Amino acid sequence: MSSAGTNGTNGTDLSTTLNNNEIAFKTNAGALDGIAIGTAGQALKVNSGANGYEFGAVAGGKVLQVVASSGEPSVATTSTSFVHLTNIPSFNITPSATSSKILLIANFGSGEIGGNNGYVSLFRGSTNLGQSNYGFVQVQHSSSHRISLGGAVYLDSPNTTSQINYDIKIKTSNGDNFSFGESCRLNLIGMEIGA
């Protein structure tokens, strides 16, 4: 645009160049142009030809929904297969698109095992999201002392728009008694992330 003189007489009159609700920009050719304002939730972005602007959906990385579950379990198992027990956090979620990711955040409280090893993992339905044998956490025998079990963060790609279940499961290596939770507050959080 040219610089404005007294009372704008030497400048460009935008009212003759732009329609109502347009945003002004200068084209690659140097001309003044306008783009109509978008709709709610859209953002101004460079078009696919990289030669102008357009309004469109914000691309990827947006949190679409959050689901959380918590509990204060004090449970035990001698199972050598992963099992879900009462009061251990679990939730259902229905992704809005097959391209969505589910960001899982979990903390496991504390535990105690009488011998050998105990294991903790995150599951989507019957699918172990951790290492197939050891899950996300391995607890070694510690002379019957309670130890902190930490937690896990995992980005899952369920590739579905059907309801799915996420939960925390535990097992032992040799049938020894694995006490889990110890009445600590456990949390399992799922965030759907748009692609």
Image: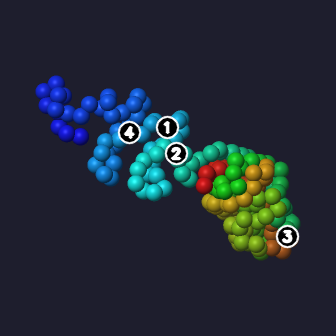
Q: Amino acid at mark 4?
A: Gly
**Pointer 2 or 4: first along the chain:** 4
Q: CA distance from mark 3 to mark 2?
A: 52 Å
Q: Secondary structure at mark 1?
A: loop
Q: Quadrant of residue 168?
A: bottom right
The crowding category of the residue bearing disc 3, from other C-alpha atoms within 10 Å (few below 14, some 14 to 19, many at least 20), is some
Q: Residue at x 38, y 39 (%)?
A: 34
From this viewpoint, which residue is outermost toward the top?
7
In the rendered image, the vertical position of residue 135 relative to residue 56, given as above or below: below
In the rendered image, the vertical position of residue 153 relative to residue 14, given as above or below: below
**Pointer 3 or 2: first along the chain:** 2
Q: Secondary structure at mark 4?
A: strand
Q: CA distance from mark 1 to mark 4?
A: 12 Å
Q: Is residue 93 left or right of residue 78?
A: left
The residue that mark 4 highlights is: 34
Q: Amino acid at mark 3?
A: Thr
- Residues 114 and 42: in front is 42
